[in-house]
Image (tube, coloured by chain):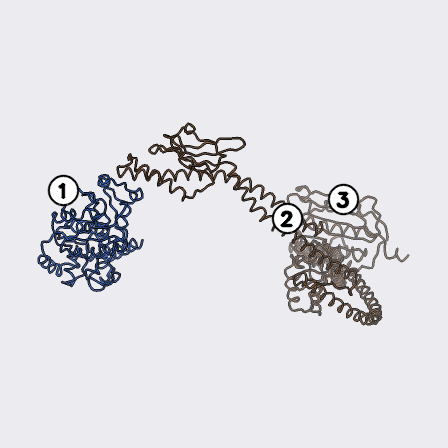
């Protein structure tokens, strides 16, 4: 309700100052389906509330140098800039911009060093984060599996969000008295090797929320074990992962758009706008994978989850 | 109805009846409402249960496991597990039948054995409701079939359960409501009884006071309420009354003494006042009698010109009673006389008296008369402003006019007689001389011839000479003129013969006829009588007495008057000339009226018509002695009267009155 009221206020403000035309630029490094989803959610909101806003989207940039050049152009021609993914957030920390800056598809903003107070970040950066409470994935696994004593967490080696997820998941496992094992991967082979080597030691495998894992086809993978996979990204469920819990990327995009409109059309200061999270993450379950594993998904989980076959 | 009965009725009986009616009606209505409500609630409950099952079924269907026995069993178990935590809207019992196993899935053990057995065949439709009876008990059933789970959900409720709620309600409510109501009624009864008792005490006390007992007081109780205040107020009022009463008694005693003295004084005053009132009344009556008996008109006038007094003479003259004219403007009754109104208004406005104003006037509907008008303003500055007095002086005026006329006529007559006497002697000498001249020229007288012979002339020559010079005609003219003058003188002498009173009795009608016949033979009017058909009307009363008179003179008098009338009629060319002669007796006089329909006599000469030598005719037609001779004949020779009664466009009326008895008769 507060968000709706806020959007209405923004809309009214936008109507009042409708004569001014703003322009923003959205960009991210590398290929990122999550960034694409967030951008889609934001654009939907822009179309509805500020259709005159000019948005330039430059995704899948190859390297930081290319991003730097782009941001120099944006600093002169745009009213705000949005950098998605944790890599983008980190780049903004190292390269502060003169125009309002927003992050999206980034992990824990505190651990990334963006701010120490997400409710009032200060400075010239705010935005949205896909970070969720890791206790919820432990809870999900407990509902689907009869027993969990040990857990393997696989992450992309070198990804800035990987240590963040690792930190939070290890704490959640510790709270649930589950042994936490983690391993960094750089290729599908690394993933397969780690899985097979830990197959007998763990009851579940959790894949990190990095684009790296999107490229793995679990159906084609030569893994024949019966340890179920879980993920922090719902896109992987459709590829054979048993279940996931993650933020709704479209929702994050809409929240991000609201923050941008507040700054441009509502004359709010960037530092006064809190960094927002999805407090009601999405549970996704692959029923075919469950059948293969011989698992019966509880009816109360089926009631709340997005089910894939 | 007594207050006690009213209070008991309104505070106890009616509320109790109303409470009974409300409770019984409420129970009946509540019963029906509960049944209807439970039916709806049961229907809603079963819809909710179906919604839960259908939702789970959709979840399973969406997940593609709706036909998976394990998932269906899990969903069923989850549903049954949650049933124990579910609250229902009614007292109804949920029963779940498995149509495949023909078993009752829920509840596994029947909690109420009084429910009838449920068979699959009982439920024909996919959903519905029904009522079944078993023994004295009725059961309401609502059901729905779950085909994908092979279940039938049934909710059943018995009438006993429904009434159980009402009974529970009544068990709870009736004692809770009746006890306080009864307690309230009882307390109200005793409270009101006490109130009525206190009111009755107050009433009894007031009745004592009403009967004159001012020593009584209400025994108040130490209850601080409105009645207590009223009782205290009544006691204070009685105290005040008692104080007033005692004070009043003292005052009455004082006043009684003062009154006795006053009575004595009053009696004296009354006696003196009575005398004064009697005197005033007498004076009022006396004054009224004076006013009413006044022979003149008295009109009291207010300041706004309205009439406040109108005496009987005014009523008699005007024809209006006092009641007709009171509070009306007095000027309304003098409308015909602008001069009089102006003079009256001047004097009324200036508040100055008016007296000796003589003029002709009319009052209201009266005939015109001569009035002596006086106005007396009242000194007292009240509404009554003045008195208008009008005396009818017509007769007096006429008498004065007559006296004046008579005196004038007597003086004129005397003058004429004197003149005649003085003229008579030289006239006689002249006549004698002319006769002698004529006789001395006659040839028949011998001395005339002798004297002529002595002078040497002949008488014939003298006669011839005189004839040639018309001397005989001149002498005859002197003789004719002298004779005419002698007749005039003779008539003038008759003016002085007033003391001659004839005593022979004659019929006046015969004299009148003789006079008219003489007139007809008058050569001056022969042509008139031949040409115009004069209408002669003779209106003579019967049995008229004879009148002592000189027949010849009276005939002369009548002749003169009628001759004047005929002269006027012949000269005025009236189409239908008429002459009316009337005779009638009145009191001690014979009245003779001679009236013509000629043009009348001008008002300006009216007073002079009886004067000698006054005439409006041509010189050849009259000498102006006819009417004056008639006047002297009537007045002086017969002690009668002659006057012109009326004249104008309708003609002239001469009236003659002749006394039926002479002065000498009266003296005898």
Q: Mark 1 points at which residue?
A: A222
Q: Mark 3 points at which residue?
A: B539
Using the rendered view, name the quadrant where residue B303 is placed: bottom right
Colour in which the image shows chain A? blue
Q: Is residue B423 visible?
A: no
Q: Residue at horizontal 27%, vertical 48%?
A: A140
Nearest the eye: B1 or B623? B1
Say which chain is brown: B
Residue count near mark 1 (Cα–Cα under 10 Å), binned few <14, some 14–19, many ≥20: few
Using the rendered view, name the quadrant where residue B190 is placed: bottom right
Residue count near mark 3 (Cα–Cα under 10 Å), binned few <14, some 14–19, many ≥20: few
- The chain ID associated with circle 3 is B
The residue most toward the front is A200
- Cα distance, mark 3 to mark 1? 181 Å
Q: Mark 2 points at which residue?
A: B572
- Cα distance, mark 1 to mark 2? 177 Å
- Above or below: residue B460 compared with residue B250: above
Q: Nearer the viewer, mark 1 or mark 2?
A: 1
- The chain ID associated with circle 2 is B
Q: Earlier in the sequence, mark 3 or mark 2?
A: 3
Image coordinates of residue B574 in percent, x first then y, are: 64, 45
Q: Residue at horizontal 72%, vertical 43%?
A: B536
Residue count near mark 2 (Cα–Cα under 10 Å), binned few <14, some 14–19, many ≥20: few
Kindly identify which numbered label has been placed on residue A20. none
- The chain ID associated with circle 1 is A
Look at the numbered discs 3 and 1 and tell me whether their residues touch, using CB distance below 8 Å. Answer: no
Q: In which quarter of the image is the C terminus of chain B?
A: bottom right
**Helix, strand or loop at mark 2:** helix
Image coordinates of residue A101 in percent, x first then y, are: 18, 60
**Helix, strand or loop at mark 1:** loop
């Amino acid at each position: 309700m507060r968000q709706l009221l806020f959007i209405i206020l923004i809309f009214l403000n936008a109507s009042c100052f409708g004569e001014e035309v703003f322009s923003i630029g959205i960009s991210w490094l590398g290929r990122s389906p999550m960034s694409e989803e967030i951008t889609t959610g934001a654009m939907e909101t822009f179309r509805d509330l500020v259709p005159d806003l000019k948005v330039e989207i430059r995704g899948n940039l190859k390297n930081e140098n290319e991003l730097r050049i782009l941001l120099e152009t944006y600093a002169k021609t745009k009213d705000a800039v949005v950098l998605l993914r944790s890599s983008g957030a980190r780049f903004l920390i190292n390269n502060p911009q003169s125009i309002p800056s927003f992050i999206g598809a980034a992990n824990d903003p505190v651990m990334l060093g963006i701010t120490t107070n997400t409710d009032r970040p200060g400075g010239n950066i705010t935005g949205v984060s896909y970070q969720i409470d890791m206790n919820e994935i432990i809870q999900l696994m407990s509902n689907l599996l009869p027993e969990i004593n040990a857990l393997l967490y696989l992450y992309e080696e070198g990804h800035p969000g990987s240590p963040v997820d690792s930190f939070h998941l290890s704490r959640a496992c510790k709270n649930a008295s589950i042994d936490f094992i983690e391993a960094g991967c750089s290729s599908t082979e690394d993933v397969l090797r780690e899985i097979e080597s830990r197959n007998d030691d763990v009851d579940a495998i959790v894949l990190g929320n990095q684009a790296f894992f999107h490229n793995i086809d679990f159906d084609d993978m030569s893994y024949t074990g019966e340890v179920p996979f879980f993920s922090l990204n719902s896109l992987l469920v459709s590829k054979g992962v048993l279940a996931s819990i993650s933020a709704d990327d479209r929702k994050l995009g809409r929240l991000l758009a609201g923050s941008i409109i507040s700054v441009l059309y509502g004359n709010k200061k960037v530092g006064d706008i809190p960094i927002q999270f999805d407090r009601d993450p999405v549970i996704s379950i692959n029923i075919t994978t469950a059948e293969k594993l011989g698992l019966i998904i509880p009816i109360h989980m089926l009631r709340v989850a997005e089910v894939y076959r | 109805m007594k207050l006690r009965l009213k209070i008991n009725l309104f505070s106890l009986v009616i509320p109790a009846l109303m409470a009974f009616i409300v409770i019984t009606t409420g129970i009946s209505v509540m019963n029906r409402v509960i049944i209807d409500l439970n039916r709806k609630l049961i229907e809603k409950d079963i819809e909710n249960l179906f919604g839960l099952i259908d939702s789970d079924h959709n979840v399973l269907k969406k997940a593609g496991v709706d036909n998976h026995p394990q998932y269906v069993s899990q969903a069923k178990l989850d549903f049954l597990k949650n049933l124990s935590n579910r609250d229902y809207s009614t007292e109804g019992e949920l029963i779940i039948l498995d149509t495949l196993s023909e078993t009752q899935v829920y509840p596994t053990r029947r909690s109420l054995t009084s429910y009838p057995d449920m068979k699959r065949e009982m439920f024909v439709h996919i959903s519905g409701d029904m009522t079944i009876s078993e023994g004295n008990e009725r059961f309401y059933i609502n059901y729905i079939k779950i085909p994908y789970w092979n279940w039938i959900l049934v909710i059943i409720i018995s009438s006993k359960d429904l009434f159980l709620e009402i009974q529970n309600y009544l068990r709870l409510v009736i004692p809770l409501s009746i006890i306080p109501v009864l307690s309230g009624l009882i307390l109200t009864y005793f409270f009101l009884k006490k109130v009525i008792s206190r009111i009755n005490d107050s009433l009894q006390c007031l009745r004592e006071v009403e009967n004159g007992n001012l020593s009584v007081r209400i025994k108040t109780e130490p209850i601080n309420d409105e009645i207590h205040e009223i009782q205290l107020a009544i006691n204070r009022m009685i105290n005040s009354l008692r104080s007033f009463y005692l004070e009043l008694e003292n005052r009455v005693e004082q006043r009684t003494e003062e009154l006795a003295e006053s009575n004595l004084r009053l009696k004296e005053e009354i006696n003196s006042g009575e005398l004064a009132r009697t005197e005033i009344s007498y004076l009022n009556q006396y004054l009224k009698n004076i006013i009413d008996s006044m022979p003149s008109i008295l009109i009291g006038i207010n300041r706004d010109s309205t009439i406040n007094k109108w005496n009987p003479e005014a009523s008699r003259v005007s024809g209006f009673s006092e009641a007709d004219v009171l509070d009306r403007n007095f000027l309304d009754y003098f409308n015909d006389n602008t001069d009089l109104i102006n003079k009256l208004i001047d004097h009324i406005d200036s508040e100055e008296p008016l007296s000796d104003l003589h003029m002709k006037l009319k009052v209201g509907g009266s005939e015109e008369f001569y009035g002596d008008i006086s106005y007396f303003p009242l000194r007292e500055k009240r509404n009554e402003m003045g008195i208008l007095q009008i005396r009818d002086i017509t007769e007096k005026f006429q008498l004065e006019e007559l006296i004046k006329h008579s005196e004038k006529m007597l003086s004129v007559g005397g003058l004429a007689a004197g003149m005649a006497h003085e003229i008579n002697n030289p006239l006689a000498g002249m006549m004698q001389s002319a006769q002698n001249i004529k006789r001395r020229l006659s040839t028949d007288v011998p001395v005339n011839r002798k004297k002529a012979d002595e002078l040497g002339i002949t008488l014939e020559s003298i006669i011839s000479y005189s004839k040639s010079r018309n001397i005989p005609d001149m002498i005859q003219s002197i003789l004719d003129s002298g004779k005419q003058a002698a007749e005039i003188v003779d008539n003038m002498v008759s003016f002085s013969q007033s003391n001659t009173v004839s005593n022979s009795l004659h019929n006046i009608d015969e004299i009148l006829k003789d006079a008219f016949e003489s007139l007809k033979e008058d050569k001056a009017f022969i042509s008139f009588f031949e040409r115009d058909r004069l209408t002669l009307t003779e209106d003579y009363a019967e049995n008229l007495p004879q009148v002592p008179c000189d027949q010849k003179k009276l005939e002369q008098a009548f002749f003169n008057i009628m001759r004047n009338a005929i002269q006027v009629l012949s000269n005025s060319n009236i189409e239908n000339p008429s002459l009316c002669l009337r005779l009638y007796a009145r009191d001690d006089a014979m009245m003779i009226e001679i009236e013509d329909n000629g043009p009348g006599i001008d008002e300006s000469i009216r007073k002079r018509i009886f004067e000698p030598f006054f005439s409006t005719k041509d010189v050849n037609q009259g000498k102006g002695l006819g009417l004056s001779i008639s006047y002297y004949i009537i007045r002086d020779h017969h002690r009668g009267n002659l006057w012109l009664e009326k004249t104008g466009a309708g003609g002239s009326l001469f009236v003659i009155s002749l006394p039926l008895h002479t002065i000498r008769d009266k003296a005898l």
